[in-house]
Amino acid sequence: MIMELDQQQKRELVLGIHDDDAVAMFKNWNKDVAKDTAKSMGIKLTDAHWGVIDFIRTYFANAGELRHARELSEALGQRFADEGGAKYLFQLFPGGPVSQGCQLAGVQVPKDASDNSFGYIV
């Protein structure tokens, strides 16, 4: 017999097998934290920003800890292709959609996000 899981059960299973610090960071996130972080980055959050942030949070909730920046970069590019893809994302997050997006979404930035093509600023 195959058991169907609801979204909450799936999320708990996925998050249950990943780094405790990453999960704590994800669970302790709220919009006020994101707003404060954005302010320190010089970003004024708009509905467009929240769309990307929500996508990153949903992606993490379904896939768990991000092992490679390229994985999220490609997913973001596909999801926001109609809006302009990478160009659109870099207009929203000039420091990089993966690096800044993850920080604002309360998701641990992938370790390999130091590649400039993924949006890391030294």
Image (spheres, grey):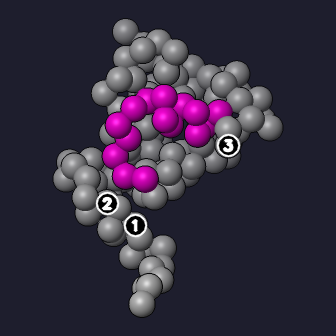
Looking at the picture, tell me which residue is in the foreground, 3 or 98. Answer: 3
Please, what is the three-letter code of the amino acid marked with disc 2? Answer: Leu
- Report whether residue 39 is seen: no
* SS at badge 3: helix
Is 67 left or right of 32, judged from the image as shown? Answer: left
Q: Is residue 43 magenta?
A: no
Q: Residue at x 63, y 47 (%)?
A: 51
- Looking at the picture, which amino acid does disc 1 mark? Arg
**Do the CB atoms of the residues marked 1 and 2 lie less than 8 Å apart?**
yes
The label shown at residue 22 is: none
The image position of residue 89, as x and y in percent, is: 64, 29
Query: Going by the picture, which residue comes out furthest to the top?
Result: 122
Q: Which residue is mark 2?
A: 15
- Spatial distance from mark 2 to mark 3, Cα to Cα? 22 Å
Whichever of callouts 3 and 1 sits on the residue coming sooner in the sequence is 1
Question: Is residue 105 found left or right of 108 in the rendered image?
Answer: right
Q: Which residue is mark 1?
A: 11
Residue 64 in the magenta stretch? The answer is yes
Q: Which residue is mark 3?
A: 79
Q: Residue furthest left?
A: 20
Asked which secondary structure carries label 1, the reply is: helix
Q: Give how far across and how far down residue 64 sits, in percent.
A: 37, 52
Q: Is residue 88 visible?
A: yes
Q: Amino acid at mark 3?
A: Arg
Give the residues in magenta: 63-77
What residue is drawn where x is 25% and y is 53%?
A: 18
Query: Which part of the image, by quadrant, shows the N terminus?
Result: bottom left
